[in-house]
Image: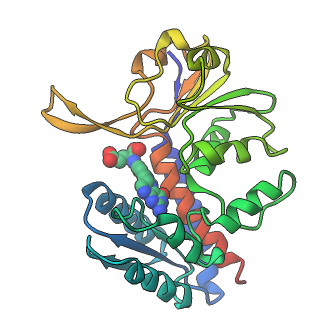
Amino acid sequence: MGTRIDGKKVAARTKADLAKRVELLKARGIQPGLGTILVGSDPGSVKYVAGKHADCAEIGVNSIKRELPENATFDQVADAVRQLNADPACTGYIVQLPLPRGIDENAIIDLIDPKKDADGMHPYNLGELVLHARGDIATPLPCTPRGVIELLRAYDIDLDGKEVCVLGRGITIGRTIGLLLTRKAVNATVTLCHTGTKDVREHMRRADVIVAAMGVAGFVKPEDIKEGSILVDVGVSRVFDEESGRYKVKGDVDKACYEKALAYTPNPGGVGPMTRAMLLQNVVEMAERQL
Ligand SMILES: Nc1nc(=O)c2c([nH]1)NC[C@@H]1CN(c3ccc(C(=O)N[C@@H](CCC(=O)O)C(=O)O)cc3)C=[N+]21
């Protein structure tokens, strides 16, 4: 049985460290604040946003909440973005995705002040990430990929020279994690697989590390993986559970794989809590840049 990588535990440790840094900021007259813009009332989004504000309270960061109705127009969302750009109490913020149909998400993201982009998903910040393969990066990084890397680092898993197979080309992780994994400081080799990949299972069998982010519940099966591989499960599917009669979050990795793995991130309880912790870390770092 592989080592269970406990995302909740590492996230809690990260938050405890951030709480101390927030104390230092406050002592120097800076009160960090995280803003959220939530459009509509998708139950998943409502829950994630609530979680982010609970995290803020835990580490002493102020919460700034903006809520718009499901039928909000592009201009109304754009106005909320401009207000947070101008609000000095807001250190950084996110626009919770997905936005309701008909609102161009990329056009909204473009309007975010890159210095306040807590998600690290603004084109300017993504561009900075592309440009800096070496040295430090002084711009916010995308939270989920950063969470994956920090989580593996916390378990002393060295990625230098490792073959990493990424499954999925979504913007949250698939398209960006390679940029972090191939930085000199991490030094992994990355293969990005997607629906157009000819033999996905062949790529998975060759990999030292699989980062699964497709949103296909149980896609990665024991016969697809190498003995002793490391499994990072980022997939989110809501699947009806016969036993409890409720919907449950299920990842892309079939639990039967855990037996064969050297280490694995459970889902839930793995990358999700780290994503949230990295959002806070981005905000604290943004506040520290104001010192
Ligand atoms: N602008 C924007 N930024 C985001 O970062 C963003 C977003 N939009 N839209 C949706 C996704 C999803 N996301 C998650 C964060 C934490 C958990 C998390 O903590 N999950 C828990 C369990 C949650 C549950 O049981 O439902 C876990 O994995 O253990 C999950 C999902 C952030 N997202």
Q: In the displayed structure, would residue 288 be above or below residue 198?
A: below
Q: Can residue 64 be seen in this view?
A: no
On the question of residue 215 being in view, the answer is: yes
Q: Residue most toward the left?
A: 245
Q: Nearer the viewer, residue 51 or 177?
A: 177
The residue positioned 48% from the left and 74% from the top of the image is 60
Q: Residue at x 36, y 70 (%)?
A: 38
Q: In which quarter of the image is residue 167?
A: top right
How far across and down, in percent of the image, does residue 54 sit? Answer: 37, 66
Image coordinates of residue 154 in percent, x first then y, are 64, 41
Residue 48 percent location from the top left of the image: 36, 58
Classify residue 192 by image quadrant.
top right
The residue shown at (15%, 26%) is: 243
Q: Quadrant location of residue 114?
A: bottom right
Q: Which of 202 and 101 is in front in this view?
A: 101
Instruction: Give left or right: position of 203 versus 277.
Output: right
Q: Is residue 2 above or below residue 233?
A: above
Tell me residue 89's x, y (percent). 52, 88
**Image point (82%, 58%), residue name:** 131
Counting labels gives 0
* Quarter of the figure that contains the C terminus: bottom right
Name the colour scheme.
rainbow
